[in-house]
Amino acid sequence: MLWLKMIRDLKENKGSYIACTVIIILGVLIFTSFTTVVESLRSSQQKFYKDQNFADGFVKVRGIPRNEIKKLEDVEGIQKIQGRLVKDVTVLMPGARDNNVYLRLVSVDPDMQNPINGVLLIQGRPLDEDYMNVWIDSKFFKANKLKLNDEIQVIADGRIRKLTVTGVGDSPEFVYVLRTAADVYPSPETFGIAFIPVKSMERLFPDEKYYNEIVFTLKPGTDYEKVKEELEKRLKSYGLESIIPRSEQMSHMLLEMELESVESMSRAMPVMFLSIAGAILYITLKRLIEHQRGEIGILKAMGYTSGEILFHYMSYALTLGILGGLIGSFLGALLSYPMASMYRKFFNLPDLKGNFSPSLIFFGILLSLSFSLIAGYQGCKKVLALEPAEAMRPPAPTHSRKVFLEKIGFLWRVLTVQEKMAVRNLSRNIGRSLFIFLGIMLCFAISTFTWSMNDLVQKMMFDQYEKVEVYDVKITFSRPLHGKNVLRELAAFHGVKYVEPMAEVPVTLKNRWLKKEAVILGLTRNSYLYNILDRNYNKITLPESGIILSERLAKVLDAEVGTKLVVESPMRAGKEDGVLEVAGIIPQYLGINAYMEIGALQDFFNQKDIATSVLLKVEREAITPLRQKYMYSKYINSIEEREQRLNKFKKMMASYGSMIYIYALVGVTIGFAIIYSSFVISLSERARELSSMMVLGMTPEEVLSVVTFEQWCISVPAIMAGVPVSKAMMAGISRFISNDMFSIPENLTLKSLFLALAVTAFSVWIAQKAAARKIKGLNPSEVLKTRE
Amino acid sequence: MGEVSVEALRGVSFELMEGELLVVLGPSGSGKSTLLNIIGGMDRPSGGELFFLGTPMHDADTRQLTFYRRNDVGFVFQFYNLMPNLTALENVLLSVQIARNPLSAEELLEKVGLSDRKDHFPSQLSGGEQQRVAIARAMAKNPRMLLCDEPTGALDYKTSIQVLKLLKDFCDIYSKTVVIITHNTAIARIAQRVFHLKDGRLDRIEVNENPLPPEKVTW
């Protein structure tokens, strides 16, 4: 019978219980789906890395003779070391003349057993070093609708060559395929990896006698830094450019980042959701128990034990917990399939799939149960303390005294009687008021935060390509060239309006014990095509000497204006490490760079007139002829159009945008659930009081005005309190996810504040509509007839 | 403001007989409800002794009191106190569920004349009907005694007589002890013994050699 009573009680107050269950479902859903995906990602990552012998270290050099590699094997701690030639080539895709499509050719030795970064062949046949054949990574293969035995035309060393696709394979090194760190998202249509036998590579590039990359694995327990030091010494003479550990390898780093963020989401979000659900449940049950004091008394008088009664009230929490846990974990398992397939789009990981894991479903239910039972127990434990005779008497009246506002005479006199009632209610039910306050604050903060995130990610992307980099075309050379000659030639090309040289030099910057690898961009003093902007978008003129750092770089190096940085670089031919003074710090959201005036940079590195790329302002129609003329040049690595890059980002943002809408929706749902249930709770708590007002002759509208006035009194300060809370959330997330590739600004956008205000006000308004309906439905005689 | 201790009952000493119908009379504040609560194990006396069939109940713990109420006592209240969202039958079953040796809920509802209204919720029943459900609920556990606190206090004359008749029947047919608390002196005439309470003291005990059947009582 008590179960029947429970079910009917639940039905009576279905609004708040449904809200509570929905939030439990969301929490458990996130837990199950994210955990499933994380587990799948982790296990396929680990298996892939282990099976394919993923490298521990990655070295870039100008060129090292092949037979020198073997000698490096005696470096202490190194397990295995391999050299290779890596070259980006332009692909001539039929029907895509204007699109820059590139392949990164990575030389492999088809005969080697268990090579480092071994390629997992998914379909096709072994590579044959006597032919021009390649294996293509699965994403590029699919995105470009290739088939086995298709021929791909590439421009290598200035000539068109044909490569036959004999297989599709993925390497642990290219799980997340980006051409450069600035790309942020993979674009398999325009960039992919091709694995090619060393011998075939030699025929493509007859001039390249040397390897330009080295990969190595470490013996267990080896100190990477020691190996790095030793390699630095030995490789200095081969033009060492960089040595990075696995943790800084781009694909690995991005995969780890994603994993960490999903992992922390899978922990933090469910806790947040379930805590909110717990709070709603706690308040609802606490209220229910106060409301059913008399009924509890009867049950006790009849001889029901406190335990039985406690269990009865806990059964509400139990029901919601099981229901929410079951639905949530089941939906979560279902959601893990589309989520895994979304990750498959970005990551080249074998065996990545969703899963119906019974143990996770069990844990999901357990999680939801533990939260709801704890909340339920806290809400119900008063049952235990009630003596039967006492329970049957109405509770002692609460203390009444003047509230703060009453002391401000003129203000108090302005209020109507209804408003005075509302104000007194607020201060006498601190717990209830606080719950509503927190609900509105959270709703506002979550909405502000999600919208701000959305705005800022957009800003981060578009600032870079709309305000900072304003050239039409960037031509990157395959090796540093003399700027003057190139500029002269390009400036004379028909349709080119303006040309600027640019030098990109990889360096290691050091400040005391802090050091960081970065790229210094050398730009003309008053560059028109690459703007150095301060926080307020004012253009900064590059100083004649000294270096300008991006904020993130300055932070990592703990540098300020005036700090002297030691600069290490293979480009500083034959000279000791130099010192550069920080002349300024600017915001930069994409990548971490340092900037110098190109002349100063050339002097510093003692490389007269050097340029690694040029920036051009070109008439639109001239771009295709320009590309056709230069794409076969062996001096040119790539010809990029800013417009295309921007469009690519816009496309990406559109698909990521939907994720943000989902987050925003979740935020709003939570906020709304809290606001709605807290309103409904406070309303049913006061059915008696409100009925009395109606009996006195007040219209439902007048009665409602007491409730709404009270709610607005809480809403306004709660919204104001939401601003610093969302700011704190923003700062937290910015610190958490900013890395070398992008840093997220910490500020809130005005637009998001307005949007959040609208969303919150809307939720409050809807909740009040529900309140109005409830008040109209009140039957005063019915309510007042029964004993309190 | 400190708490003021109020002595509701002092120097009250009596025995209850099996199968008797007893009325406790007294004006408001005379300690009737406190007495009932103590007899029924709802409250503990701050001093004195209470025995039930030889078992001391005055120092019983909460659990003992709960099982005493569960097995040996049935309560009927002035304001019926039915579970508002359980039907008449379900309210009775609530009590059947925890009893060791319950009576049939359906039969009891028939006895109180409500078998055709058994699926109605309390809000759909009149006061008298609700009180009859409450009595059926109290009797369903088949307790040794029925304690009734102003059972007719909220009812009109005709309905009150019906209720009293039910209580009397329970006492006679099942030979159970029934204690009725009231401030209505007319009701005292159906009892075998009447306790007069005044200012928390047992003023006098009146023995009624010829109790009237309820239908003969008027006020």
Image (cartoon, coloured by chain):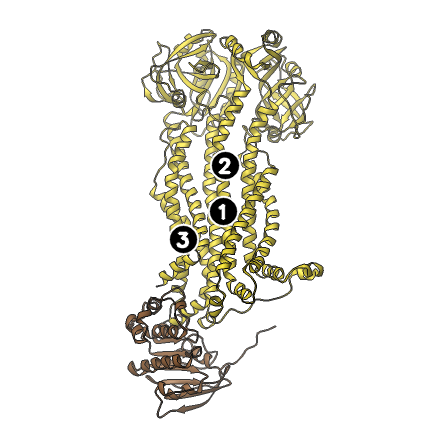
Relative image position of residue A215 (x, y in whole percent) = 45, 20
Q: Is residue A32 left or right of residue A397?
A: left
Visible in this render: residue B16?
no
Give the image quarter of residue A129. top left
Is residue B58 found left or right of A711 in the rendered image? left
**Which residue is labeled 2 in the image?**
A660
Which chain is home to disc 1? A
Q: Which residue is mark 1?
A: A670
Q: Amino acid at mark 3?
A: Leu
A85 vs A6: above or below: above
Calculate the distance from the C-alpha at mark 3 to the C-alpha at mark 2. Answer: 29 Å
Q: Establish if A437 lies above or below A188.
A: below
User: Considering depth in this image, is A707 or A78 the residue closer to the camera?
Assistant: A707
Secondary structure of the residue carrying tag 1 is: helix
Residues at discs 3 and 2 both on one chain: yes
Residue behind mark 3: A320
Q: Is residue A584 above or below residue A125?
A: below
The reply to the same-chain question for discs 3 and 1 is yes
